[in-house]
Amino acid sequence: MKDMKELILPDGPRYAEDHEWAQIDGDVATIGVSDYAQDQLGDITYVELPAVGDIYKKGEEFGTLESTKAVSEVFMPISGEVVEVNEALGESPGLVNTDPYGEGWLVKVKMDDPSELDSLMAADEYGAMLEGGE
């Protein structure tokens, strides 16, 4: 497990309490899990993701990450329609471990309500939440 100082927390994405992140580009959000989440899970061996066209409300489970330690659900940080799925994770689920904010992204979603982003945390707020042990 990484020490808090070793965790990568880029400033661009917004973070959910469940450890997902959303990086916004126009009306599309790229969604993944934080460095903290992948570190807690350990080596990810399988990723189950939704289909393009699936619609989710904020907070709904949209997939699972299986690791050598556990199976963990991932939750949608914003409402919207899945417009792209990271197909590379089918063959290389470990990308979530090695590059959680880059090649290890999970899905891209066309947002229904961009104001939902206001409920997500900036990197410094998310870091403070992690340090608080939540």
Image (cartoon, helix red, strand yellow):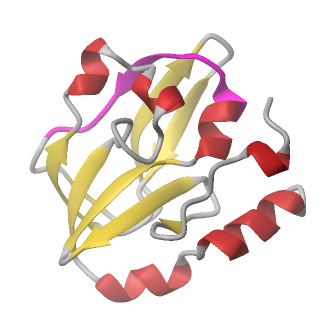
Which residue is located at x 33 percent, y 37 percent?
Answer: 103
| Residue 1 placement, left or right of 105 | right
Question: Residue 81, located in which quarter of the rendered image?
Answer: bottom left
Quadrant assignment for the C terminus: bottom right
**Position of 107 compared to 77: left or right?**
left
Q: Residue at x 66, y 21 (%)?
A: 42
Instruction: Please identify the quadrant where the N terminus is shown.
Output: top right
Kindly identify the residue that appears in the image at 27 percent across and 47 percent down: 107
Direction front: furthest residue: 6
Q: Is residue 94 above or below residue 100?
A: above
- Name the one closer to the observer, 101 or 41: 101
Quarter residue 88 falls in: top left
Give residue 123's quadrant in the image.
bottom right
Task: Tell me which residue sits at (57%, 31%) in the image.
Answer: 72
Up-down: is 78 above or below 49?
Answer: below
State the image coordinates of residue 63 (x, y, percent, origin top left). Answer: 39, 37
> Residue 22: percent from the left, percent from the top?
41, 63
Extreme-right residue of the structure: 132
Question: Is residue 69 located in the magenta-colored stretch of the structure?
Answer: no
Q: Position of residue 7 (x, y in %)?
A: 71, 47
Q: Nearer the viewer, residue 44 or 78?
A: 44
Q: Which residues are magenta?
A: 40-51
Residue 121 lies left or right of residue 92; in this view the side is right
In this rendering, the count of numbered labels is: 0
Left or right: 133 as drawn, with respect to 83 = right
100 vs 4: above or below: above
Q: Nearer the viewer, residue 14 or 99?
A: 99
Q: Is residue 96 above or below residue 131?
A: above
